[in-house]
Image (spheres, helix red, strand yellow):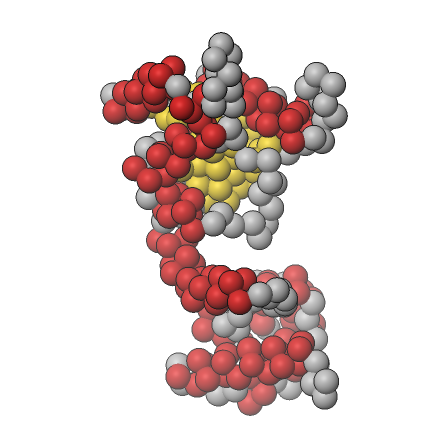
């Protein structure tokens, strides 16, 4: 290609930022002098030093590292910051369904960003939450950890006596009535990894009816991880907290299954759900 994808994305992002700044009455960065905030005594020493050797803001910004740019924009304010973060997502769409899903994701991003801005307590991302002796990544409403009653939803795939799928039995129907009655009394949050079919049905019911839910998952929650739309909407309503334990495999194998097998991971997630139900301390966010 005559132009690399990186060159095209850089040009597109620069043009959008330039137009946005023009709408605010700001000249382009190549014609803007270095802001006075960069030369004040309270500015970082490295910024004062670099500002002295550049004629305009554009040249100055291009000479900064990613970390330095973050400090720079903190000094000069939001108006002069680019519209876009660094880098871009170069996902290859494998088929038309995948392409349509990516298009929908891009169109929905501004709404998600707005919700995260106006609902910070409900859409909070914490990479390290200490609950007892365990460490978790978390996304959602951390206040659910303070609710007075916690009920674990756990059921086997097969009924222990009839060996029928458990979710088809009268015992499961009785469990469902008990779980839902606990929620309706108030002050109760459901905790489950939603692994077996019966657990998954109750988890989906909580998401649909906005019942308070703490959902345990095996996928780690990192800096850029986001839930799919159904769980994102539940988080935005304040009814969901997603927890992902760090070092899940360190809990060891279950029976003869190795620690990194789905069998062991699923059993260990249910063990963690039981621990959370019994936990009486205060969750601690580790910075």
Q: Whole-percent x and y of residue 247? A: 68, 31
For residue 71, which quarter of the picture?
bottom right
Decide: is 224 above or below 101.
above
Along the viewing direction, whichever of 286 and 6 lies nearer the viewer: 6
The location of residue 216, given as percent across then percent down, is: 52, 32
Residue 109, image x, y percentages: 45, 62
Residue lying at 43% horizontally and 51% vertically, measured from the top left: 229
Residue at the image point whose x is 49% and y is 47% from the top = 227
217, 145: nearer the viewer = 217
Q: Quadrant of the C terminus?
A: top right
Residue at x-position 54% and y-position 62%: 98
Is residue 132 placed above or below 242 in the rendered structure?
Answer: above
Image quadrant holding the N terminus, namely bottom right
User: What is the x, y in percent for residue 49?
Assistant: 69, 72
Whether 164 is drawn above or below 27: the answer is: above
- The quadrant in which residue 220 appears is top right
Q: Residue at x 25, y 24 (%)?
A: 184
């Amino acid at each position: 290609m005559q132009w690399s994808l990186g060159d095209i994305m850089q040009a597109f992002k620069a043009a959008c930022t330039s137009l946005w700044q023009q709408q605010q009455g700001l000249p382009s960065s190549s014609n803007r002098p270095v802001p006075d905030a960069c030369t004040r005594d309270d500015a970082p020493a490295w910024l004062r030093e670099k500002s002295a050797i550049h004629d305009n803001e554009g040249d100055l910004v291009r000479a900064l590292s990613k970390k330095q740019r973050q400090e720079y924009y903190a000094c000069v304010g939001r108006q002069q910051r680019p519209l876009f973060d660094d880098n871009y997502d170069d996902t290859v769409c494998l088929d038309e369904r995948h392409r349509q899903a990516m298009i929908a994701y891009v169109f929905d991003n501004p709404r998600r960003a707005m919700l995260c801005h106006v609902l910070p307590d409900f859409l909070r991302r914490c990479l390290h939450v200490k609950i007892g002796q365990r460490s978790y990544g978390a996304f959602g409403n951390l206040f659910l950890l303070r609710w007075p009653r916690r009920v674990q939803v756990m059921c086997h795939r097969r009924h222990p006596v009839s060996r029928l799928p458990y979710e088809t039995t009268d015992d499961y129907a009785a469990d469902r009535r008990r779980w839902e009655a606990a929620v309706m009394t108030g002050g109760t949050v459901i905790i489950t990894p939603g692994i077996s079919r019966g657990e998954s049905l109750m988890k989906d019911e909580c998401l649909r009816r906005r019942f308070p839910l703490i959902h345990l998952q095996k996928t780690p929650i990192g800096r850029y991880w986001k839930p799919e739309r159904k769980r994102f909407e539940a988080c935005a309503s304040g009814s969901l907290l997603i927890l992902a334990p760090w070092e899940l495999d360190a809990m060891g194998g279950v029976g003869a299954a190795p620690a990194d097998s789905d069998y062991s991971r699923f059993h260990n997630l249910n063990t963690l759900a039981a621990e959370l139900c019994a936990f009486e301390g205060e969750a601690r966010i580790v910075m």
